[in-house]
Image: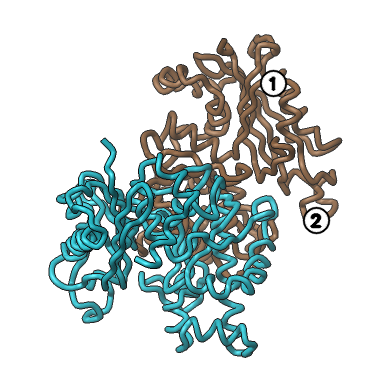
Chain colours: A brown, B cyan
Amino acid sequence: MQSKYIGGLDIGGTKMAAVVANAEGPLARVTEQTAKTGTERAPGEQGVALLKAACEKAGVDFREIDTVGISSCGPFEKREGLITLVTPNICGGLAGNPGKLPNDWKSIPLESVLREHFKTVAIENDCVAALTAERAFGAAQGIANCAYVTWSTGIGFGLCVDGHLLRGKNGNAGHAGHMLLSEHSQAQCGCGNYGDVEALISGHNLQAQFGRSATELFNAARDGEAAAGKIVDAAASWFGRALYNVTAVLDIETFVIGGSVWQHHGDWLQERVMRELESRMPALTKGVSLLHPRLDSYVADIGALHLVMPAEWEAAWRDTQPWQTLANS
Amino acid sequence: MQSKYIGGLDIGGTKMAAVVANAEGPLARVTEQTAKTGTERAPGEQGVALLKAACEKAGVDFREIDTVGISSCGPFEKREGLITLVTPNICGGLAGNPGKLPNDWKSIPLESVLREHFKTVAIENDCVAALTAERAFGAAQGIANCAYVTWSTGIGFGLCVDGHLLRGKNGNAGHAGHMLLSEHSQAQCGCGNYGDVEALISGHNLQAQFGRSATELFNAARDGEAAAGKIVDAAASWFGRALYNVTAVLDIETFVIGGSVWQHHGDWLQERVMRELESRMPALTKGVSLLHPRLDSYVADIGALHLVMPAEWEAAWRDTQPWQTLANS
């Protein structure tokens, strides 16, 4: 029999959120700072505890949840067929900067810990989960060749070609933020790469390169400050080159672009990005469109839930857009 | 009823080949220089004529062929849902170099011309067709996340993720040879890009950059000539970066590498390419392997045929490897 309730987890480098839903929509949501101390099991156990707390808040018996979808930062590795997180901004043992994080973890046994409590566990990269949500309920409905892109602290992609969501050998398809674009740049990414997309233009790395936050830089550029304008023009060009490269590899037709940079500045950056994208290979780039997500800040929660949602719930959720209630939960 | 005979066309910028096959294997093959004069219909009509000639050679009634698979150079555009070729090295109107080609074509109505003669027509990019052949009969059997790469006059990719062959909105997925890798390079690709993979390392563009053919450069490097060694080392690094980028985007596990450069020099270049590839993002690159194709020079013909081959022929072809007979046809 189909579960009456499902759970969703959104695991980020900073914050973790749990949400419980039924056929009518999300019922309750709780969040915490992501656990970074104790054993490697801590984040997985925190996920279970947060789902318990969300159930309590919603007045749902936790034992009724046997199905959980997880939208998580990556990258992933598989250990004995189960997904572990090898995420440098949670695992101190991978951060390449001793003492930066309060642990020496090298991988987090996420799937195995969750499977101790739940029968069905589906884990996807956060941008892949976001793409499934935008395809089901948002801006990418009915578009067979599309990508979800986040331009925020980091840069991530979720990819769909010919109507198939791309996962890859360990569920790491979409790490296009770590494509190399520049051979001379001294900008370094958290992954160690010099000159990859994230090194060049992520919020974190703009701050590291120029000593000013992305918010400050993009606001100043929009307000006409020349120095910030030059930095932001270059960043928009790099972003356009990244979208061009993904278009060349996959013949994408639509990019749905989320993340704080695009949310606040997409409208005026769009022209610069499109100029870079459309200047090449017209057979591939002609007609490519850039769209805003329609699920806004709920995309990660709805993405996590959508990974395990019974198909018969979808039509009603498309009609009622019940994620709006999360704002009050 | 299933056709007793099928046809295959391999359309390249220089040469076109037609092959006719039945359940036992290919029966005959004919080739010509690709037509570049007359109307835009010329290459499509040449394909029909070559299939007729192949039938004649095989003693098959041409009217028995109603199903044809085509492996073609790209890129493609769709006109009223049918594939046209917009290929700068066949279409003079796109070559960006007036007088270089003896026509002013801007697109070639391939699918519509072929559909005047055949009921079933399947057209794929040549590297996509090659990948289907290597997945069915060659080195990529049973590998869900794999790519076919050619390093030759140009650079092309065919891509498969999660067992799905990637096509994209116009069948142009796999144009990763046109990914931008270098922001300062003056090397220009036939597509107009500066610093894309093909501009940097294709046989055609190595000749244009260094005034020596790829054959000469790679042979000299293998024989220890320092100047050639430096050029070839750089080319191998660029190739490794291209494979790394595709791995970051798609979480590929195996690259099957064809084309004349790798066929003759892959064995000693492999270590340099792998060094570049494996130096980054271990969660994605660990365990990635580079393989030689098993179908060798038959990969385009078998790729074209495989696009339309009845499923029940496959097992026998895997056993008997009947493409070997093409060598004598």
A264 with respect to B26 (left or right): right
B139 w.r.t. A166: above or below = below
Name which quarter of the figure residue A208 lies in: bottom right
Residue under mark 1: which chain is it in? A
Where residue B324 appears, as percent x and y from the top left, is: 44, 61
Which residue is identified by label 1?
A: A118
Res. A223 in view: no
Where residue B73 appears, as percent x and y from the top left, is: 34, 63
Res. B4 in view: yes
Give the number of the mark in front: 1 or 2.
1
B148 w.r.t. B318: above or below = below
Where residue B210 appears, as percent x and y from the top left, is: 48, 87
Structural crowding at the residue carrying mark 2, measured as other residues with C-alpha within 10 Å and reported as few (<14), some (14–19) or many (≥20)? few
A310 with respect to A10 (left or right): left
Near-viewer residue (A310 or B73)? B73
- The type of residue carrying mark 1 is Phe
- The type of residue carrying mark 2 is Asn
A294 w.r.t. A95: above or below = above
Residue drawn where x is 17% and y is 73% of the image: B37
Where residue A211 appears, as percent x and y from the top left, is: 66, 60
Label 1 – label 2 distance at C-alpha: 35 Å
